[in-house]
């Protein structure tokens, strides 16, 4: 069984930065696809960054040039948020497709618990 643990959210002023982290915990696994989503009150969950295999990350126009997703080791994904705006206020969730090997090989999707990002002066 694998679980994802997020950290790094908080309150920041417009124009500020935050660094979100998502770490996978478990035994004998590897991360395949990863993504970050966000959900603001009263709105649908929105994709803000995605990365498949060994390719480059993709971003929607709303965050392109301000958000950057990177892998940090075999079990952690980072989302760097720069030049934050009030419209970026939301709960941010990481998502991973993980291949585990014990007791048998299988693929499964996992979500982090969410971390609140609030942008306000």
Image: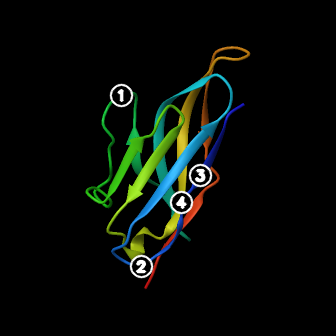
Which numbered circle lies on residue 33? Answer: none
Can you give x and y, in whole percent of width and height, for residue 47 in the image?
43, 51
Give the mark nearer the N terminus: 2 vs 4. Answer: 4
* Residue holding disc 1: 54
Q: Are marks 2 and 1 in contact (CB under 8 Å)?
A: no
Can you give x and y, in whole percent of width and height, for residue 27 in the image?
68, 26
* Residue holding disc 3: 6
* Residue holding disc 2: 13
Which residue is found at the position 59% from the left and 52% from the top? 6
* Residue holding disc 4: 8
Asked which secondary structure carries label 3, the reply is: strand
Q: CA distance from mark 1 to mark 3?
A: 22 Å
Q: Are marks 3 and 4 in contact (CB under 8 Å)?
A: yes
Crowding at mark 4 (Cα within 10 Å: few <14, some 14-19, many 20+): some
Which residue is found at the position 60% from the left and 38% from the top? 24
Give the mark nearer the N terminus: 2 vs 1. Answer: 2
Q: Are marks 1 and 3 in contact (CB under 8 Å)?
A: no
């Amino acid at each position: 069984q694998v679980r994802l643990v997020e950290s790094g959210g908080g309150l920041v002023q417009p124009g500020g930065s935050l660094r979100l982290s998502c770490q996978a915990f478990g035994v004998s696994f590897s991360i395949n696809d990863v993504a970050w989503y966000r959900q603001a009150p009263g709105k649908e969950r929105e994709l803000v960054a995605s990365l498949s295999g060994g390719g480059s990350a993709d971003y929607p126009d709303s965050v392109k040039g301000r958000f950057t997703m990177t892998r940090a080791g075999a079990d952690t994904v980072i989302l760097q948020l720069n030049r934050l705006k009030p419209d970026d206020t939301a709960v941010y969730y990481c998502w991973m497709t993980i291949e585990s090997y014990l007791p048998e090989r299988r693929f499964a999707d996992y979500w982090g618990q969410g971390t609140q990002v609030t942008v306000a002066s």
